[in-house]
Amino acid sequence: MSSIRRKIIFGYSLLAGGVAAFTLLAWADLRWLEQRIEEGIAVSVFQESALEMRRHEKNHFLYGGAAELEQALQLAAETGTRLGEWREAFAVIAPELDIAALGQALAQYRYLLAEQQQRPAPALAQQIRNVGHDISTAADYLAAHERTALAATVQHSQRLLFLGVGVVVILGIVGGQVLSRVTVRPLRRLEAQLKPITAGDFAHFPKVSDDAEIVSLTAALNRMLDELEARRRQVLHAEKLASIGVLASGVAHEVNNPLGNISSSCQILLEELDSTDPATLRQWLEQIDGETRRAQVIVRSLLDYARRGTCTISAVELKSAVTQTLVLLRRALPGVELHTEVPAGLAVLADAQRLQQVFINLIKNAADAGARHIHLGAAAAAGTNWPPQPPAHIIGTAHTEDHPGVVIVISDDGPGIPANVLPHVFDPFFTTREPGQGAGLGLYIVEEIISEHDGCVAAESPAAGGARFTLWLPAAEVTS
């Protein structure tokens, strides 16, 4: 398996290799330039020796004197020696120059100077001048070519230097981009995937890179998410146990009241059965019947919650579901005006019967609270209508990025929800009504049904008054 460490080491090794190669190339180029300079110095010395040799030669023929001739002869010997030492370099500098012929000319020049010392003659002097002129011309030609070659060498070194620097810079840029791609990009992707955790989404991170370090970090994060999910489930289990305790306590309290009234009425009847008039007996029997019906309502609410069975999810046309709900409710809510605003063709993924139960519970809850105008509207979920702004109490999380949703709003003109009551409206057996007026399971069942549909529900009390319940459900396409 690859690793970021290996890639970084490889990148730095590649960069170090490029720098080392550039350094070696620069050293070789400088060494070559140094050699060209040494050759240039040798050419300059050769040319100066030839010029000095000719100067002594001219002084001898103009002014006479054996010393001038001796100096010319000595310089001719030195020039010939230098030509022998740098023969190969001179041949490279000036390929057209016949170095062998130049050497022969220097040898002939020395011979003629020696003859001039022994037997001076006008004809011999002219030969010396002619040979010396050829040597001077060759030295000038060699010096000119040397200057041209040195200038070309300097230009070549400059081009090589710029090329080497460019290659090193390109290697640095490419290496930086590669390191950024193999390290920074996977980390940024992991950072982006960490954001849903704050919203309670503990989905596993997919593999974003094959590098050992990133794979290890991803595995560690996934283990952390597993632990968080396990802890969340433990907390949820504890909450369910607490809810069961509240449920048992609520059942005992709610059922005990009508049973106590029934028991008291029965005892009175047993004691005064023979002495009581029929009207009083009838009153006590009606009280027993009323308390019995009250107990039946409590038990029926519990059975409705316990017998929900399997949830069958399908595409439900929202307008049709609302219409069927209103048919069931209109006669049961005298004096309440229901207004709906549901576009045709809008559908949700839901169980049709349970969705109707949600609408019934919310509408009846608003009517029982004293509302006389209830509005039910629906629209496709968008950033402008979801999530509700605080102070709303929201149960669940709407994953609008993963799946399109539908927002359903049920609002009323009732007394609203007090701030201290708002966090408890979805708790089981929580109610603000008088004893015997409700079991406190309606909104709890609404929250349970919405959670089964992977949806969300929010309760709020707007500043304008009344109460408002906002539902988010996954959207669906209506099949014809």
Image (tube, rainbow, N blue to C red):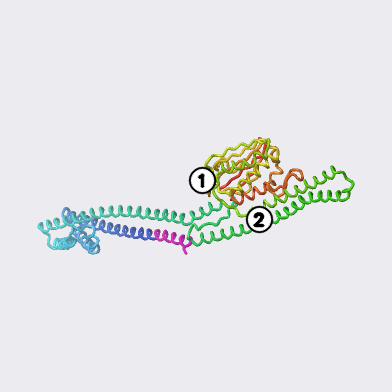
Horizontally, residue 344 falls left or right of residue 414, namely left
Taking the image as shown, residue 138 lies to the left or right of residue 409, namely left
Instruction: Report the residue marked by disc 2.
Output: 236
Q: Position of residue 365 (x, y in %)?
A: 68, 42
Query: Which image quadrant is residue 80 in?
Result: bottom left
Q: Which residues are magenta?
A: 1-19
Q: Position of residue 203 (x, y in %)?
A: 56, 55
| Residue 8 lies within the magenta run | yes
Residue beneath the point at 71% across and 55% down: 244
Q: Amino acid at mark 2?
A: Leu
Identify the mark nearer the N-term, 1 or 2: 2
Q: Secondary structure at mark 2?
A: helix
Q: Position of residue 328 (x, y in %)?
A: 63, 42
Which residue reaches farthest left? Answer: 123
Q: Closest to the observer: 180 or 77?
A: 180
Residue 57: quadrant of the picture: bottom left
State the SS at label 1. loop
Res. 478 mark: 1
Nearer-the-camera pick, 399 or 51: 399
Q: CA distance from mark 1 to mark 2?
A: 35 Å
Q: Is 123 colored magenta in this rendering?
A: no
Amino acid residing under circle 1: Val
Label 2 neighbourhood size at 10 Å, few (<14), some (14-19), many (20+)? few
Residues 14 and 198: in front is 198
Callouts 1 and 2 close, C-beta under 8 Å: no
Q: Residue at x 28, y 52 (%)?
A: 151
In the image, is 144 to the left or to the right of 178? Answer: left
Circle 1 crowding by C-alpha within 10 Å: few under 14, some 14–19, many from 20: some
Q: Main secondary structure of the magenta part?
A: helix
